[in-house]
Image (cartoon, rainbow, N blue to C red):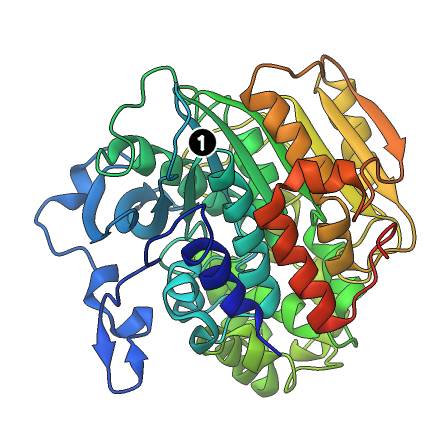
């Protein structure tokens, strides 16, 4: 059985989409590429980099048609930060240029688990198969259409998983990095861009979409598609606690503390010894090594006061600020005030029976957006596991993004539907993905035995 890491190399290097090596090894140790914490690429070396504009390239690594760059961004606490992105140019780019800003489900609070490292080192990065598979599918689809692709480490250098502000700023600055990188994109004249992501990447995509009106006013982003989106921290903790997915809840608690020193200081007083050890494990271990030791852990058992910790003023502050769609203007939480409204047409999808990301708060979020003038098409589907929904909705999501990039969006207000329009395996689904991306889905189905609705 080939792992999902191999799908990236197969789909991008061996197909007609990109018939060149994906990445040369940027830094080698005795066991292959160095992890980000030991790789000087991730540390700005030039003087005065903090004074650069956000999205400015600090350093780039040339690997022919694929580059990894270090670019400037701003943290949630308004400090200069540097994070990395992988930039792809298609073999046959369309003109004017069209761009996919893909925010991958990194879902880790460890700086050594970034998507740039996973793209370079595949399975050796210890990233989850789901991260590598989703990256390969979205990148392959976009390149086959002639679209440029930016895949930033949107959690920033501190791996601030589930910090929506961090994800929005670093994500949008990742698009700026592509626009600034002439080796990948010779001219950005008349470009259009879209945002896409699922699960943790959907969280980042939704936050980036609602920050466009304030932080991204200069960017020509015309639409977004995202699914499996965590709306708030509490529902995530409640759903995942005492399950095999508890490591994701621990990662979310840790990533938020990585973003905000005040919350981290609160943890130092509120955690019991086991909780302190568990948070440290989440800061140093990728998800492939975190799932087993944290299986069925009660996240509230990490705190001295148990679930009552949620009522502590500091926790309440960050839980409230992390609720998707809420206005946020406290300067201790964001350097840029934001009204919480998605200002572009969006396609959002979610499984009603999602076992990993709670569905319960999603309808209220959607309705709240619609009441304020958003233009979202929301699709729900019952009976799908979290990972399955990503593949099942790929045809609908890619069609929406393709229509947006080609000026064919008709979404002028909120609409909703039940079920998937382009069923997996149908001619419409295969056409929406393209043959290269469909081949990836077929390989995954054959390797895992996953059954998608409509597929044979």
The spot of residue 437 in percent (x, y) is 60, 49
- The residue located at (80%, 63%) in the rendering is 239
Where disc 1 sits, the SS reads: strand
- The residue located at (60%, 28%) in the rendering is 402
Q: With 449 as the anchor, is 346 left or right in this view?
A: left
- The residue located at (53%, 54%) in the rendering is 135
Q: With 41 as the anchor, is 276 left or right in this view?
A: right
Instruction: Name the residue beneath numbered marker 1.
Output: 99
Q: Residues within 10 Å of mark 1 (few under 14, many from 20)?
A: many
**Foreground residue among 232 and 307:** 232
- The residue located at (58%, 75%) in the rendering is 2
Q: Considering only vertical position in the picture, is 106 above or below 4?
A: above
Q: In which quarter of the image is the N terminus?
A: bottom right
Q: With 180 as the anchor, is 248 left or right in this view?
A: right
Q: Quadrant of the C terminus?
A: bottom right
Q: Is residue 76 visible?
A: no
Residue at the limit of the structure toward the front, as seen here? 16
> Quadrant location of residue 385?
bottom right
The spot of residue 237 in percent (x, y) is 73, 63
The spot of residue 337 in percent (x, y) is 48, 28
Q: Is residue 429 visible?
A: yes
The spot of residue 389 in percent (x, y) is 77, 52
**Foreground residue among 405 and 210:** 405
Q: How many labels does the image show?
A: 1
> Quadrant location of residue 175?
top left
**Foreground residue among 179 and 15:** 15
Q: Considering only vertical position in the picture, is 403 above or below 287?
A: above
């Amino acid at each position: 059985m080939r792992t999902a890491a191999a799908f990236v190399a197969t789909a991008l290097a061996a197909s007609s989409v990109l018939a060149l090596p994906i990445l040369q090894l940027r830094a080698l140790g005795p066991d292959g590429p160095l992890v980000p914490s030991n790789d000087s690429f991730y540390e700005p070396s030039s003087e005065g980099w903090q004074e650069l504009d956000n999205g400015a390239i600090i350093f780039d690594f040339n690997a022919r048609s694929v580059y990894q760059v270090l670019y400037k961004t701003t943290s949630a606490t308004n400090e200069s930060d540097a994070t990395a992105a992988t930039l792809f140019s298609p073999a046959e780019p369309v003109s004017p240029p069209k761009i996919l800003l893909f925010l991958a489900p990194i879902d880790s609070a460890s700086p050594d688990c970034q998507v740039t490292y996973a793209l370079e080192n595949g399975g050796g990065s210890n990233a989850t198969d789901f991260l590598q598979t989703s990256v390969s599918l979205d990148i392959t689809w976009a390149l086959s259409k002639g679209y440029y692709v930016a895949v930033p480490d949107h959690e920033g250098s501190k791996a601030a998983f589930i910090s929506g502000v961090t994800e929005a700023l670093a994500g949008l600055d990742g698009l700026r990095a592509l626009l600034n990188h002439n080796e990948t994109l010779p001219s950005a004249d008349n470009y259009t861009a879209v945002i896409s992501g699922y699960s943790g990447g959907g969280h980042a995509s939704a936050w980036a979409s609602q920050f466009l009106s304030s932080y991204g006013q200069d960017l020509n982003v015309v639409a977004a598609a995202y699914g499996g989106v965590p709306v708030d921290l509490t529902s995530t903790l409640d759903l995942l606690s005492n399950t095999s997915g508890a490591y994701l809840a621990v990662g979310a608690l840790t990533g938020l503390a990585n973003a905000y020193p005040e919350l981290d200081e609160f943890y130092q007083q509120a955690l019991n010894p086991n909780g302190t050890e568990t948070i440290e494990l989440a800061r140093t271990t990728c998800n492939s090594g975190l799932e087993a030791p944290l299986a069925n852990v009660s996240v509230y058992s990490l705190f001295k006061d148990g679930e009552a910790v949620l009522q502590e003023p500091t926790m309440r502050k960050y839980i409230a600020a992390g609720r998707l769609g809420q206005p946020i203007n406290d300067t201790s939480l964001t350097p840029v005030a934001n009204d919480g409204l998605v200002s572009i047409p969006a396609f959002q999808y979610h499984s009603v029976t999602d076992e990993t990301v709670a569905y319960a708060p999603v309808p209220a979020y959607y309705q709240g957006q619609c009441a304020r003038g958003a233009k979202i098409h929301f699709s729900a589907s019952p009976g799908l596991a979290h990972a399955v929904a990503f593949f099942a909705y790929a045809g609908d999501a890619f069609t929406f993004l393709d229509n947006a990039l080609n000026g064919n969006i008709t979404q002028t207000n909120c609409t909703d539907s039940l079920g998937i329009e382009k069923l997996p395996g149908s001619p419409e689904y295969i056409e929406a993905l393209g043959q290269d991306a469909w081949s990836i889905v077929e390989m995954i189905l054959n390797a895992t035995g996953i059954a998608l609705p409509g597929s044979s």
